[in-house]
Amino acid sequence: MDFNYFINQAIDYKKSVASKYLPVSQGEILSKIREADEYLLSIKYDGHSYLLCYENGEVALINAGGNIIEDLPVLIDAKILFEELKIKKACIAGELYFNKGEERSRVFDLTANLDEKSENIYFAGFDILSFDDTEYQKSELLKKQLKLDEIFKKGKKLHSVGTKTVSSRKEIEDYYKQVVLTDNNEGAVVKSVEGMIYKIKPSVSLDAVIIGYVESEGNRSGMIREVLVAMITDDNQYQITAKIGNGFSDEERKTLLKILDKIKVDSDYIESSGANVAFKMVRPELIIEYSSIDLAIENSKGSINKMCLKYENSRFSAIQLRTCVSSMSPVFIRMRDDKKVNKNDLRFSQITDSVELIHSEKKLDLKKSTIIKREVFYKEVKSHKMVRKFLLWETNKSEDPDYPAYVFHFTDYSPTRKDVLKKDIKVSDSKKQIQAIYNKNILENVKKGWEPVK
């Protein structure tokens, strides 16, 4: 068997198909799923995605990570099936999962039983890449599903996900209620004849502490735009988990900004918001509950890593990147005054109870930043000295997705002001843009009476 060929097939399938499933919550079925003449509905099994590959009498399960399985009992059934069908070569996408009978199976059950080569590990086929000399187009949804049903019509450990064909979104809603809410499956998959594929799962509710915020601009100035939240690991580090900008009322945005403005702290780590503005970091005090349609453990570049921070002496510092998740459509639900900032109430296992992470830690061993420009100005008024400092640097860490390429930092010190020290940070991946930001701040903040510090 040409393993490299099938690994490349798995990688391509993941990038072009599997990673583009659109997450939808139950409440969004009627609004987010586009109207179409026909939909194919199937159960979403809780396991690992693999390609079932067959060539020249050899059979294996292969995934996009290059993992190859050749010794599960289910593969014996697959070999017999393909031989009976007189097939020379096949490549079928599906979900490898652990069958627990009437009880719902979780991905953890699969992992726990893989090494034991359990007889209860099943394969549910949901797509065909190729079958003998026929290569199926991604848009041939109904044709492929009928073929899957035909291939696996006698199968037990090997079976098709099965489908139900409907013509309305109301029928999709009814199907979801039956297979997920009543039958306790992980979720449902909806394939539109127009080519769109949707993944419907119950939303996950999580508790986390706010560690940073970004203020809105323009006519929404005076409100928060987005907050950065974290959970606490077993070793008492703050694991960044999400950036949340939806779900807040305007009144909540105003109130939160007033509170967060008063508890700002320093940080040697910069995290940028969706608007490419650096979060202002705050004391970890305010706990919120938020929901997420789905928790993705991978993106097109592989596993997702996010920064773990230490909070000590009113300052955050970066410790290491750890395997984490990406929250799909996170939404603020409510403040949690009944929770405390500790590793029990804000435990990171809220996430690992829902999804399986392949743990990895990436110690920080990054290049030092390079100062591009630094200017300091002072002004004396009635024997009081005011200072404004402008700093621009290149991080030399832009190959790491958790770091911007360039950072601008403005410090404004005025001893006669109520808020004595003010800071502003902006980030960009464009040198031209960050230099424009620097020059604009110089023009706006260095006027008559300000003298450069030699």
Image: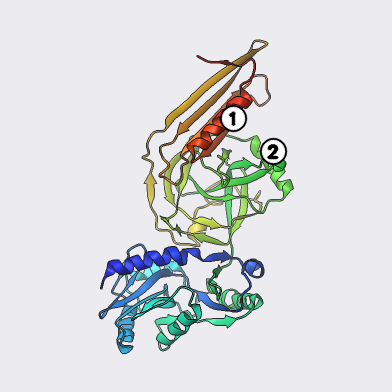
The answer to which quarter of the image holds residue 278 is: top right
In terms of depth relative to the viewer, which is nearer, 162 or 36? 36
Tell me which amino acid carries mark 1.
Lys
Few, some or many residues within 10 Å of mark 2 (<14, 14–19, 20+): few
The answer to which quarter of the image holds residue 57 is: bottom left
Q: What secondary structure is marked by label 1?
A: helix
Indicate whether 105 appears above or below 203.
below
Where is residue 133 drawn, in percent x and y?
Answer: 34, 80
Q: Look at the image and tell me in which quarter the N terminus lies.
A: bottom left
Mark pair 2, 1: CA separation? 27 Å
In terms of depth relative to the viewer, which is nearer, 104 or 345? 104
The residue wearing badge 1 is 440
The residue wearing badge 2 is 258
Who's the residue at 37% across and 72% down the image? 51
Between disc 2 and disc 1, the foreground one is: 1
Where is residue 193 drawn, in percent x and y?
Answer: 55, 76
